[in-house]
Image (cartoon, helix red, strand yellow):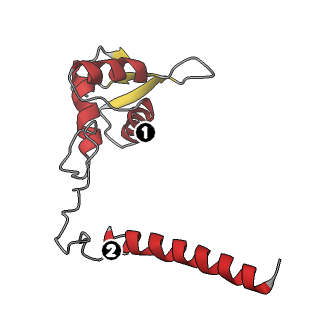
Amino acid sequence: MEIAELRDKLKAELAVVEKFFEIAKARGANGSVTKSATGVDIPRPAAQPNLRMPGLERKYGALAETVQEAIKLAPDKYTIADLFEILGKIGKPLEKGQIGTVLNRLSNRENSPIQVHRRGKGSRATIFKKVSETKV
C-alpha cells in the first residue's frame, strides 16, 4: 500500500470518528446541554424508576416494611416462597433474593419479630416462624 493511499484511508476514518463525536456531543454524551442541529434544546428523558420496586420514594427500610406487611398476612410458619406469593397478590412484588435478605437480617436482630424454625439445606427451604407477641 502506498503512503498516499494510507493517508487517504486514515483521513476517511478520522472523518467518520469526528462525525460520531459530533453526534454524541449533540446528544449530550458528555453531560452538556442537549441541542438539536437547529440549536433548539432537546429535553432529556427523566430517569425511569424501577416501577416494580415498592417504596418508590426510596426511603430507608422500605423493603423491610414491605416484607413485614407480608409476614403479618402469612401463616405462623412460612417460607420465602410463601412471602413471594403473598407479595405478588398484594401488588408489591419483590425478588426472592430480596425477601431472603430481609428475613435473614430480621431473624438475626435482638427482639426479632421472626425466628428460624428449621434451616434449609439443599433444595429444602428454610422455614421461618412468627415470634409470639406475649413473652413472659
* Cβ atoms at labels 2 and 1 below 8 Å apart: no
Specify the label residue 89 is tagged with. none
Where, quadrant-wise, is the N terminus in this rendering? bottom right
Q: Of marks 2 and 1, which one's residue comes earlier in the chain? A: 2
Q: Is residue 28 left or right of residue 21?
A: left
Q: CA distance from mark 2 to mark 1?
A: 36 Å
In this view of the protein, which residue sits in the foreground, 19 or 108? Answer: 19
Residue at the location (59% across, 75% down)? 12
- Residue, far right: 1
Secondary structure beneath disc 1? Answer: helix
Where, quadrant-wise, is the C terminus in this rendering? top left
For the residue carrying disc 1, how many other residues have a C-alpha within 10 Å: few (<14), some (14-19), or many (20+)?
A: some
- Residue 51: image x %, image y %? 25, 39
Specify the label residue 31 is tagged with. 2
- Residue 124: image x %, image y %? 57, 17
The image shows residue 90, relative to residue 19, as above or below, that is above
Specify the label residue 101 is tagged with. 1
Residue at the location (66% across, 80% down)? 8
Secondary structure beneath disc 2? Answer: loop
Q: Nearer the viewer, mark 2 or mark 1?
A: 2
Q: Residue 62, located in which quarter of the rendered image?
A: top left
The amino acid beneath tag 2 is Gly
Q: Residue 77, located in which quarter of the rendered image?
A: top left
In this view of the protein, which residue sits in the foreground, 64 or 54? Answer: 54
In this view of the protein, which residue sits in the foreground, 20 or 48? Answer: 20
The amino acid beneath tag 1 is Thr
In this view of the protein, which residue sits in the foreground, 25 or 107? Answer: 25
Residue at the location (52% across, 20% down)? 125
